Amino acid sequence: MFENINNKQIFKYGKDAYKKAILQAVDCKSFILDKDEDELITSIDQNSCYNCLYRRWTQESFMCMALNK
């Protein structure tokens, strides 16, 4: 669900693919919930890449810092 762009792992479905972001987070061993509730996009009890501490927003989507290690 990610594509490599300039050596960065970018979520290829953008900022509004809630179901895909949830599915991706279910299998992710690096997922950590962002503790800043103002930064959460989906419900607090739901793992989603959109709620992950390791996501960094871009203009169109986000990059996964855990995959960029």
Image (cartoon, rainbow, N blue to C red):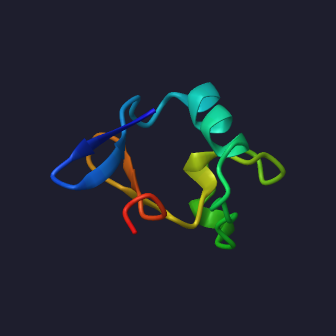
Report which quarter residue 13 is drawn in: top left
Q: Is residue 60 left or right of residue 28?
A: left
Residue sitting farthest toward the bottom: 35
Q: Is residue 19 left or right of residue 55?
A: right
The C terminus: image quadrant: bottom left
Residue drawn at x 34%, y 45% is 10
Report which quarter residue 31 is drawn in: bottom right
Residue sitting farthest toward the left: 6
Q: Residue 59, relative to residue 7: is it above or below? A: above
Residue drawn at x 27%, y 55% is 8
Q: Residue 35, relative to residue 31: is it above or below? A: below
Expressed as whole percent of the image width and height from the top left, the position of residue 2 reads 40, 38
Q: Residue 42, relative to residue 6: is it above or below? A: above
Residue drawn at x 26%, y 47% is 59
Q: Is residue 11 left or right of residue 18?
A: left
Q: Is residue 32 left or right of residue 59?
A: right
39 or 19, nearer to the observer: 19
Residue drawn at x 15%, y 52% is 6
Report which quarter residue 7 is drawn in: bottom left
